[in-house]
Image (cartoon, rainbow, N blue to C red):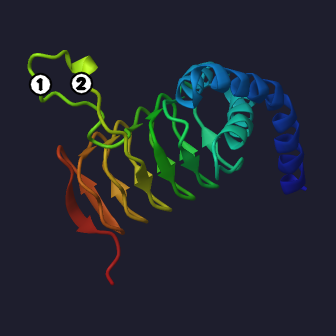
Amino acid sequence: MKALVKTALRLLFVLLALPFYLLFKIQCAVMGADQAITSWSQLMSLWPGMLGVYLRAAFYSLVFKHTSQELVIGFGTLFSQHDTQIGAGTYIGPQCNIGKCAIGKNCLLGSGGHIMSGKGQHNFSDPEKPIKDQGGVFTKVSVGENCWLGNGALVMANIGRGSVVAAGSVVIDDVPAGVIVGGNPAKVLRALHSK
């Protein structure tokens, strides 16, 4: 019975999200998808409580490719890139900032975490030119299934399946599967399971 009620609620919230989705598509045509997702994620982030959880799940399942509606995205969480996907069963805590990424199934992202669009977003090689005008390269960061990113973690590289990133860590290099990393820059602290 509980599963049936959840399914009915998800369907209801998809219907409620459709007008937002249509307005999003119009804005995409005018300003581009990344600018539109930035604007709409700010609006979606402000809905409180369970209403917000269901509305965000419905909206992002329509907007992002390969994104499940079976997820929780906390209050105040912002997205900056349209090329994002989120797997089923994933929890993204409040006040997160998410760039261009693919987050696997059953992941936990603690409050205030950031997944950036790689570590080359900003160039600063020309001292004569303002940094804001030097551009950069956005790369898609992958977070494998069943990962846990602690509160305030900053992620700029791929995280292997089943790994844990300690709270406040700064990940600048790819993390292998099944390990715990921590620190700034994050280093492997230990393997999670003996093989």
Q: Which residue is mark 1?
A: 126
Task: Report helix, strand or loop for mark 1.
Answer: loop
- Looking at the picture, tell me which residue is in the foreground, 128 or 89: 128
On screen, residue 3 versus residue 108, left or right, reads: right
Q: Name which quarter of the figure residue 48 lies in.
A: top right
Determine if residue 48 is in view. no
Query: Badge 2: how crowded within 10 Å, few (<14), some, or many (20+)?
Result: some
Image height check: is 14 above or below 85?
above
Query: Badge 1: how crowded within 10 Å, few (<14), some, or many (20+)?
Result: few
Amino acid residing under circle 1: Asp
Q: Which residue is rendered at x = 65% and y = 47% of the image?
A: 71
On screen, residue 139 versus residue 131, left or right, reads: right
Question: Which mark, by number, is residue 134?
Answer: 2
On screen, residue 161 versus residue 170, left or right, reads: right
| Quadrant of the frame with the C terminus | bottom left
User: Sequence order check: which comes first, mark 1 or mark 2?
Assistant: 1
Q: Name which quarter of the figure residue 32 lies in.
A: top right
